[in-house]
Amino acid sequence: MAVWGKMINIAFCDDDISVLEELQGLIRQYEEEHERKIACASYSSPLELMAAIEKGIRFDILFLDIIMPGENGMDVAAEIRRVDDNVKIVFLTSSSEYAVRSYTVGAFYYQLKPIKKADFERLLDSVLWTWDRERTNSIVLRSKNGITRIELKHLEYCEVIHRTLFIHMDNGKVLECIGNLDGLCKELDVYGGFLRPHRSFLVNLDYITNISYRAITMSCQVEIPIPRGKYHDVKDVFLEHAFKNRQVLV
């Protein structure tokens, strides 16, 4: 389980070395002018980039050329999406031929070359604003399918079974993650709005529909057991949360 730090990890992949050097220079100028901490990596071929990703290196933002020898950037992006749903992909190209297709791999933007400094700054402002906003109310987990960013408002409840975390989302999707419930509880504690009523469960208070002496009923109709003697503690935490968020009428 992991959450990115304040350092922003950006990568460039382009077969033109002069373009890579230009992009690195623009990043350094942006970093100095905006006082942002940015780690930057450059790759001159898709094979180099994929080798790094296969070793476990992850990026927050990826600037990817589309037309390159061997494997084009669009196919590379599709491969990356199989292991990382979160990286913001910005395509760089001298042709608009792939503009429509770029959104099938969840591209953030499609930037035509040559890139002007003012255009690059506006683009980076936009992608970093989105990155900051998502990071504020989300966590990043390592699941069996790769790295996944989870928005906390969509996390309904979690359970641990045989040392595996099962993250239940409000759309019915279940993620199997590496980690333990103690660590997840500690990670979510700073956000508030979550309760651990049982050693094997963690619930989002916003999704509780009923509390009895024996169980909590969630929006998905799943019942979370309440240990004997814990009913009043659970009820008090829930009511405090509900009143605080003006969910209770008196």
Image (cartoon, grey):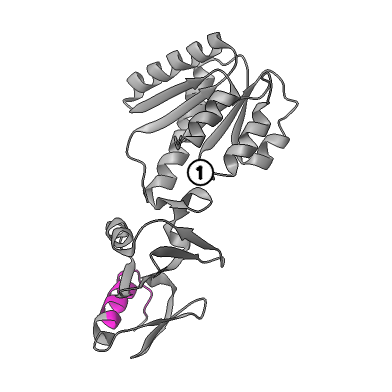
Q: Which residue is mark 1?
A: 86
Depicted 10 relative to depicted 131: above or below = above
Comparing 224 with 98, the one in front is: 224
In the rendered structure, which amino acid carries the disc numbered 1? Asn
Residue 185 falls left or right of residue 85:
left
Disc 1 packing (10 Å; few <14; some 14–19; many ≥20): many
Q: Residue at x 44, y 61 (%)?
A: 153
Q: Residue at x 48, y 50 (%)?
A: 148
Quadrant where the C terminus is found in the figure:
bottom left
Depicted 97 relative to depicted 135: above or below = above
Residue 126 visible somewhere in the drawing: no
Q: Is 238 part of what is drawn in magenta?
A: yes
Depicted 213 relative to depicted 94: above or below = below
Residue 142 visible somewhere in the drawing: yes
Q: Which residues are magenta?
A: 234-248
Residue 172 lies, in percent from the top left, at: 56, 68
Comparing 54 with 159, the one in front is: 54
Residue 43 lies, in percent from the top left, at: 52, 20
Q: Residue furthest right?
A: 97
Residue 2 falls left or right of residue 126:
left
Residue 156 lies, in percent from the top left, at: 45, 68
Q: Residue furthest top?
A: 18
Q: How many marks?
A: 1
Q: Residue at x 38, y 71 (%)?
A: 203
Mark 1: secondary structure: loop
Q: Residue furthest bottom?
A: 213
Q: Is 68 part of what is drawn in magenta?
A: no
Residue 197 falls left or right of residue 107:
left
Residue 176 falls left or right of residue 188:
right
Q: Quadrant of residue 100?
A: top right
Main SS, magenta residues? helix
Residue 63 lies, in percent from the top left, at: 54, 26
